[in-house]
């Protein structure tokens, strides 16, 4: 079952260029992973320092493999230096989970 992951980060607007470069590098890393489908980056219109990356994966297991990889941990460490607060993750299944 395909899943979408929302990754929310808050950056100081003075650091957005650096953050953008890291997000792009992380995306290229994700693109080489099993199960990666797509991703997009969104910025809040009222608070441009709030950035949401919406990533789609074939399975939650595929996402977790990337999330817990040493390569991604390096990106997370570097982004943490630019962030204000913690990264927030939200996982969603495509479609509604209805009982049969």
Image (tube, rainbow, N blue to C red):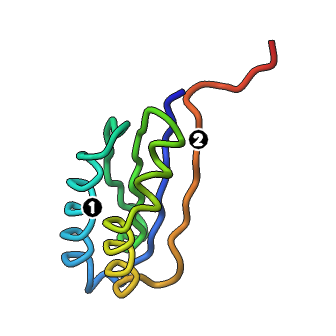
Q: Write down the quadrant of residue 45 in the picture.
A: bottom left
| Crowding at mark 1 (Cα within 10 Å: few <14, some 14-19, many 20+) | some
Judge whether 19 appears above or below 91 on screen. Answer: below
Closest to the observer, 45 or 71: 71
Where disc 2 sits, the SS reads strand
Please tell me which residue lies in front, 27 or 34: 34
Q: Would you say 25 lies left or right of 84 here? A: left
Q: Residues within 10 Å of mark 2 (few under 14, many from 20)?
A: few
Q: Is residue 33 left or right of residue 56?
A: left
Residue 8 point in image, percent of width and height: 48, 64
| Front residue (pair 65, 37) | 65
Q: Residue at x 32, y 54 (%)?
A: 41
Question: Dividing the image into 4 quarters, which one contains the C terminus?
Answer: top right
Q: How many marks?
A: 2
Tell me which residue sits at (46%, 84%) in the image: 84
Q: Residue at x 20, y 63 (%)?
A: 25
The x, y position of residue 80, in whole percent, is 40, 82
Looking at the picture, does residue 63 appear above or below residue 43?
A: above
User: Which label's residue is closer to the chain start, 2 or 1?
Assistant: 1
| Label 2 sits on residue | 92
The residue singled out by tag 1 in the image is 26
Residue 11: quadrant of the picture: bottom left
**Extreme residue in the right direction:** 99
């Amino acid at each position: 079952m395909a899943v979408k992951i929302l990754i929310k980060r808050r950056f100081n607007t003075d650091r957005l260029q650096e953050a953008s470069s890291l997000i792009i590098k992380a995306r290229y890393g994700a693109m080489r992973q099993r199960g990666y489908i797509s991703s997009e980056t969104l910025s809040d219109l009222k608070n441009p320092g709030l950035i949401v990356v919406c990533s789609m994966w074939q399975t939650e297991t595929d996402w977790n493999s990337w999330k817990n990889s040493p390569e991604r941990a390096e990106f997370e460490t570097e982004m943490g230096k630019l962030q204000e607060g913690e990264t927030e993750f939200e996982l969603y299944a495509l479609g509604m989970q209805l009982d049969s």
